[in-house]
């Protein structure tokens, strides 16, 4: 059976099972099975691959059950790096790249060796990306999940930044409360508890609830992080936080209430949604 035929049948099957990006997912999974690129698939559309169809069919069946592609192939590209992914960690989103980019810009403005804390590191995407792009930064990364920390450590080793990242098990800021940083960065859980089960099944059924659940109003982690961050920041330090839809105003209110930060900067993502909040210590 040719690649053309296999892709067509797989795409139709995924569409029938409610997969939105059926053709893209079919291509990514086949490229993974064949250990090649999506571009190469199009070059070889008439190639017969009967010896690989069983493995591919199995992946397509799993994708039809709404298991995320990143979990099926074990990697997700983020900031130009292919991060190891398991069901124990939140899959890095493109929106979070904006958080990393803004954090890097602010750290580089310090023009000196710097320190950062990544709160709720998950796969380590934020901590590893920052360490990869800034040679003179050291990062402390926390997570309450030992399984998530194992994934994060594997990614730090994969990209040779493990000597500049200290991974610590614990809840949010707690294991780092004795330290000072130039930046405290986080993409915390921010989905209101009652909303999670209404999300697409790839998220609600297959990603760790611990990384999604932000409490009754989605703001529990912001209150804890913001409330404890000022005393942990150096005098010219800053916090950078990813936020959910319609959370800019309430999170800004939490920051203002501390009376420890200067004016808040709100950055929109490519869809025009308020996505990142940055506030510098007074």
Image (cartoon, grey):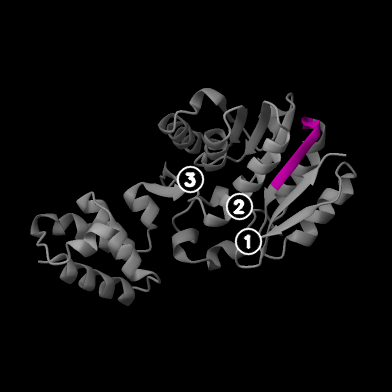
Rendered location of residue 119, percent (x, y): 64, 39
SS at mark 1 in the image: loop
**Mark 1 touches mark 2? (CB < 8 Å):** yes
Disc 1/disc 3 C-alpha distance (Å) = 23 Å
Mark 2–mark 3 CB contact (< 8 Å): no
**Residue drawn at point x = 77 percent, y = 35 percent:** 237
Q: Is residue 160 left or right of residue 9?
A: right
Pointer 1: residues within 10 angstroms few (<14), some, or many (20+)? some
Q: Residue at 75%, 60% (x, y): give it.
A: 248
Quarter of the image with the N terminus in it: bottom left
**Where does the magenta region start and end?**
232-240
Q: Earlier in the sequence, mark 1 or mark 2?
A: 2
Residue situated in front as seen by the camera: 193 or 227: 227
How far apart marks 1 and 2 lie (CA) works out to 7 Å
Q: Which residue: 53% across, 37% down?
A: 145
Mark 3: give few (<14), some (14-19) or many (20+) Cα within 10 Å: many
Label 2 and label 3: CA atoms lie apart by 19 Å
Task: Please identify the quarter of the rendering in which residue 216 is found.
Answer: bottom right
Residue under pointer 1: 269
Q: Is residue 5 magenta?
A: no
Residue holding disc 3: 89
- Judging by the rendered image, the residue that carries numbered circle 2 is 98
User: At which x and y percent is residue 6?
Assistant: 18, 67
Please name which of the two marks, 2 or 3, marks the residue nearer to the observer.
Answer: 2
């Amino acid at each position: 059976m040719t690649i053309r035929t296999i892709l067509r049948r797989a795409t139709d099957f995924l569409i029938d099972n409610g997969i939105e990006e059926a053709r893209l997912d079919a291509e990514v999974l086949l490229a993974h099975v064949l250990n090649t690129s999506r571009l190469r698939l199009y070059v070889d559309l008439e190639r017969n691959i009967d010896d690989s169809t069983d493995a591919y069919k199995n992946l397509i069946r799993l994708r039809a059950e709404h298991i995320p592609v990143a979990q099926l192939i074990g990697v997700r590209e983020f900031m130009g790096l292919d991060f190891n992914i398991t069901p124990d960690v939140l899959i890095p989103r493109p929106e979070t790249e904006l958080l990393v980019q803004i954090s890097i810009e602010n750290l580089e403005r310090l023009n000196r060796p710097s320190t950062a804390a990544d709160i709720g590191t998950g796969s380590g995407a934020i901590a590893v990306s920052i360490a990869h792009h800034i040679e003179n930064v050291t990062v402390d990364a926390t997570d309450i999940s030992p399984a998530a920390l194992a994934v994060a450590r594997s990614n730090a080793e994969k990209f040779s930044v493990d000597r500049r990242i200290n991974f610590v098990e614990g809840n949010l800021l707690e294991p780092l409360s004795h330290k000072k940083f130039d930046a405290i960065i986080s993409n915390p859980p921010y989905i209101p508890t009652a909303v999670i089960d209404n999300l697409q099944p790839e998220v609600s059924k297959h990603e760790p609830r611990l990384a999604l659940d932000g409490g009754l109003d989605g703001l529990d982690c912001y209150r804890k992080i913001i409330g404890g961050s000022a005393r942990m920041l150096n005098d010219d330090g800053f916090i950078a936080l990813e936020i959910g839809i319609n959370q800019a105003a309430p999170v800004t209110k939490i920051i203002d209430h501390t009376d420890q930060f200067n004016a808040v900067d709100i950055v929109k993502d490519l869809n025009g949604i308020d996505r990142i909040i940055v506030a510098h210590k007074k």
